Image: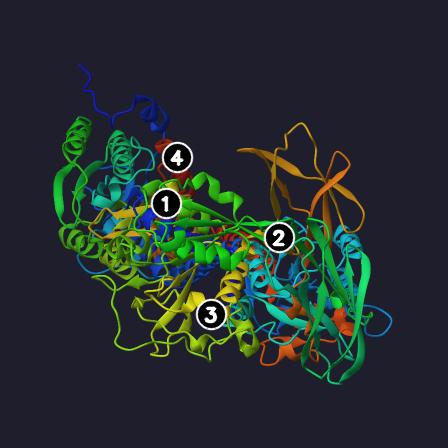
Amino acid sequence: MPFSFLHTGMLWWLAAGAIPIIIHLLNRRRYRPVPWAAMRFLREAIRVNARRIQIEDLILLALRVLVLILAALAFALPVLKSQLLFLGRQPHVCAVILLDDSYSMNYVDGETSRFERARAAARDVVGRLSRGDSVSVILMSERPRRLFREPTFDLDQARNQLARLECSYAASAAEGALALAQEDLAKARQPAHWVCLISDFQKGLLDGAACKALLGDLKKKADLVAIPIGEGYDGNLGVVSIETDAGVLAAGIPTVLRARIHNFGQTPQQDYPVELFLDNQRRDRRWVTVPPGGEVDVTFLAEFREAGQHAVEVRIPADSLPTDNARHHVVEVRPKIPILLISGDTTGRGGIGATEYAGMALAPGWLVGEIEEDHLSPARVGVAQFRPADLDQYPAVFLINVATLEADQISGLERYVREGGGLMIIPGDRTDVRFYNENLYRNGEGFLPARITPPGFRTEEGECFLSPDVYDHPALSVFADRSHGDLSQIHFKRTLLLEPPTTASVICKFSTGRPALVERTFGKGRVILFASGLGRDWSDFIWKPSFLIFMRRVGDYLMRRETAGLNLGVYETATRFIRGASAATPMTVVHPSGKNDLAELESALGGMRMQYAGVDRPGVYRLITEQQIIGQFAATVDPRESDLGLPPMGLINAPLRIVQPTDAASIIGTDSAGSELWMMCLKAALALMLIEVLFLLWIERREKRTTIHEPV
Amino acid sequence: MPIRSPYIDPEIYNRVHKMVLRARAIVEGTIVGQHRSPYHGFSVEFRQHREYAPGDDLRYLDWKVFGRSDRFFLKQYEQETNFIGHILVDLSESMRYGSKPDQTKAEYAKLLAATLSYLILQQRDAVAVSVFTDRVVSYVPPSTNPAHLYRICHVFESTRAAEKTNLGAILGEFASRLRRRGVVIVISDFFDDLDRVLSGLQYLKFNRHDLIVFQILDEFERSFPFRGLIRFEGMEDEGIFRTQPQRIRHSYQELFGRFTEGLKAGCERMDVDFQQVLTSRPVDAAIREYLARRR
């Protein structure tokens, strides 16, 4: 339809056009009766004038109806969607600028960064707007936000705020920003809508069904323009991750730190230096060769002598995108790592049962009290003595050959896992399968990773071995190197038949293909269920060297809970429970930029819970209270943003009109959304009113002509 | 005891008391009066000479003419007589109109007729009154008795305007009834077909009556001063017309003027006295104006 109306509700007033007709019809009942004698002259006069009067009446009626219709149309703010701009005035514009402030816009190609040029283009666009136009600036990233709460008509203020705007460290994403633009357009009262995306248009920025739907919708309502920023691209290398083999590190125990370097460019990078910093001290340097589009893992061996939280930084030489040239990581180092073994065993022959085998695997000197050399510190507790309140002390828990649990024990374990704890369940002779299925599995609602087939244990014919070719899981990857043990040499006499739901994953199978280890993520934590027991009647696993390694790796894997809250994404809210802290003691967060912020504290059982929402750049944030560092956490950027690609790849197949940044100031007005016709309608209504008055005057003047014949 | 009637207004009668309505044409009377009679004799007023014929009375020989021309001529003299004034009053529906409720054309016509009757009677002439619509509704035969006026007024009081008019036909009918020449006064608004009206007057004139026409009009009929939305309801079943009168006033006035001018011109052609009277004008003033012009 060539017409649209901004206030469609006012179109109801078009019905007012019927008012003159209704008045005309009502007037027919308001004629004053007069008896008349000289009817022959009256009849003849009417006959002579009937046509003229009819035409005059029709003209008057049409004029009055048109006046009302035009007035109603004017109030409905009609817009003509055509190029016939001469019909109306240039419409006021509601401009929505989507300015990409993802950190890829920090890429410096040429003398300035892409963001600086995008900012300048945005200011040019705002400078082009005129009085009565409004502008809304939406910062387009995975953290979309408006620069002004409402679209502003203060264009000078908008330009000033744009000049002060800085690029964020968020990854790029368009969906949220497009949704905000849609909201702004829905509220806009101006007839012309104009949406301008200023971005480097990374590959995939506008992909996705939701983005395409939003763009399609915006295209119907507004003139969609893209200003691609970024002329050149000479590649980019970034540190995309830092990992430790164990979630919780022990003091004095060497650990492996693995940094991954990605070459996002088209040329190979040879002998590229990669440096490791521990607590801001450079500790190591490696040289790597990274193929184009590929990545390499750089492995550092690090040892933290003191317990506590330590900052790890991996740095590469600066390039055009500085944000990803360093990556930070905070690790938790403990003097000993306690692990809880909940046992349903009565002590076996020689006082050693499945729980003891597991404990000795975790800390070989544990049973005889010589665990100084071990970083793990198992603690055995009988199921009857198990108190759920103690769970928070342990980063990992093993449930071994437990028959049943009390209701509070079940709920305690469930809460523990949900909040990030790691749990391994090793059945045994005592395990009550029916109880497990009904109370721990609960048709997939509980934390038990798989249903155990009733009526109970099922002994398979023959012997089963762990499948030798499934070492892609972090807990088992060590066995890829056969020197650490060969799982396929383990003889299982008895196994359980597990039926995992789709929400669980099988991380290891028996040679028969049935699940041997099933893992399920439950809340923030994870649970692993073993399909066999540790007693001699079950297998010879406990006699194999690989058993020790298996238990320690699984323990390390489950202990990742301890790292929660240490490493965040930028803009996440940092939370930390500080045991023993009080509200009277303020807590300061030292920002990577050096500034100090006060953290929000709220009371929690046994201490205070700290919240800090000022994580707005990558780096290490330190928590200080009473001039002592009590912790730290690291914030990192999303490495996907480092993949800049050749701009503007994200514009391919997007329904946008592309305008170069140098032409940014000239785009408004060249392709208007339409012509505002309300003024024209109002003028036409006034003109018709004037014509009606003149017409009435003309009729009246003619009527005043009299030809009275004097008596003869 | 004096008789009260709305049509006997002593003030008006006092004002018209000394006026005289003379018959301009020759009228046929029965007694000696003020008006010329068609019956020639040997009265005091010479009219013409006529050649002597055997048997003529020698007393009327004009010897002076014989002395000069040696031929015998008789002198003829006009005889003065009284006349009968026939007053024809139109009381059709259209005469019921009056812009003021107490001043309808019918009432005015009755008052005018009564006043003229008084005028005729007080000069010892006879007066007869006919009230008509599309037929003769009532008739008062001629009489010279002054008390005859009360009879006329009584007829006026008992007659209301009603029915349609058909002037052409009714005037023709009167022409056939009134064989004796006299003064015929027609009082009407003449709202009928002009040709038929003139044709009816022509019939009367054909009988050599001294014909006087009073056209009674209301001021509103002439000026048509209405405004707004008016539903005109015809008084003689002519239907209803809704209009805004101001928008047709000019045409109406033109048509109305054309009609009255046509009526006047037609009367002049037939040597008929025409007097247009507005009901707003006092009756005696209208009569005085007419008589002054007639003189």
Residue A544, given in percent of the width and then of the height, sits at 46, 70
- Give the left or right position of residue A412, taking residue A595 as reference: left
Q: Nearer the viewer, mark 3 or mark 1?
A: 3
Chain ID at mark 3: A
Q: Secondary structure at mark 1?
A: loop
Decide: few, some or many residues near mark 4? Use Cα within 10 Å; few <14, some 14-19, many ≥20.
few
Q: Nearer the viewer, residue B208 or A137?
A: A137
Q: Which mark is residue A207?
A: none
Q: Do the CB atoms of the residues marked 2 and 3 lie less than 8 Å apart?
A: no
Q: Secondary structure at mark 4?
A: loop
In the rendered image, which residue does mark 4 sit on?
Answer: B281
Chain ID at mark 1: A
Decide: few, some or many residues near mark 3? Use Cα within 10 Å; few <14, some 14-19, many ≥20.
some
Same chain for the residues under marks 1 and 2 in the image: yes
In the rendered image, which residue does mark 1 sit on?
Answer: A383
Q: CA distance from mark 2 to mark 4?
A: 107 Å
**Relative to B265, residue A292 above or below:** below
In the rendered image, which residue does mark 2 sit on?
Answer: A572
Q: Do the CB atoms of the residues marked 1 and 2 lie less than 8 Å apart?
A: no
Q: CA distance from mark 4 to mark 1?
A: 133 Å
Q: Nearer the viewer, residue A644 or A409?
A: A409
Asked whether the viewer can see residue B24, the reply is no
In the rendered image, which residue does mark 3 sit on?
Answer: A544
